[in-house]
Image (tube, helix red, strand yellow):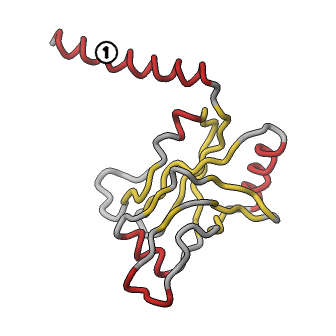
Amino acid sequence: MAAKDDTNYKVIAENRRARFDYAIESDLEVGIVLTGSEVKSLRTGQSNIAESYASIENGELWLINSYIATYLQAGVFGHEERRHRKLLVSKKELSRLWAAVGRDGMTLVPLVMYFNHRGLVKLKIGVAKGKKLADKRETSAKRDWNRQKQRLLKQNY
């Protein structure tokens, strides 16, 4: 990610549920093609990627079902809130993602959308495998135990 003292870095939207529902194998930073009104709306922080996913269609990578609120000052030059948005990735990475989805049964899950240090909108995609109910329970139990452990350690000091 970016350094802590980086003034331009700003998280726009985060998919916190993704790490609970999926086992993330690897992640990849990709660019995203946006219109001007979408960028203006993202600067105000009005977006959601929790219900979205990435898909490879016709040799291109697309972000599907992501929400970016309409920018009221755009007037007639606005955008659709839930349109398919093209993701920018190299051909080598695209073929690797295509193989992971096709052969290994993986899913492409957006993890976080942010402005990088140059002010460009970037999206971090995770190559993930869905968890079963027992795995989710195990993750939840492990998280609860870590919280309890931290409380016990804090009380002892």
Residue drawn at point x = 78 percent, y = 38 percent:
105
Among all residues in the image, which is located at the extreme bottom?
76
In the displayed structure, would residue 61 be above or below residue 2? below
Q: Position of residue 87 (x, y in %)?
A: 64, 64
Q: Is residue 154 left or right of residue 17?
A: left
Q: Position of residue 114 (x, y in %)?
A: 44, 59
The disc labelled 1 sits on which kind of residue?
Gln
In the displayed structure, would residue 1 be above or below residue 90? above
Residue drawn at point x = 48 percent, y = 47 percent:
15
Reading the image, the residue beneath label 1 is 148
The local crowd at label 1, few if under 14, some if 14 to 19, many if 20 or more residues have their Cα within 10 Å, is few
Q: From the viewer's side, name the closer residue of 63 and 150.
A: 63
Look at the image and tell me in which quarter the C terminus lies.
top left
Helix, strand or loop at disc 1? helix
Q: From the viewer's side, name the closer residue of 91 and 83.
A: 83
Q: Is residue 10 left or right of residue 105?
A: left
Name which quarter of the figure residue 83 lies in. bottom right
Q: Is residue 58 left or right of residue 156?
A: right
Q: Position of residue 109 (x, y in %)?
A: 61, 47
Q: From the viewer's side, name the closer residue of 3 and 9.
A: 9
Residue drawn at point x = 63 percent, y = 52 percent:
53
Q: Position of residue 133 (x, y in %)?
A: 60, 23
Name which quarter of the figure residue 34 lies in. bottom right
Residue drawn at point x = 41 percent, y = 73 percent:
41
Q: Is residue 95 left or right of residue 25?
A: right
In the displayed structure, would residue 81 be above or below residue 110? below
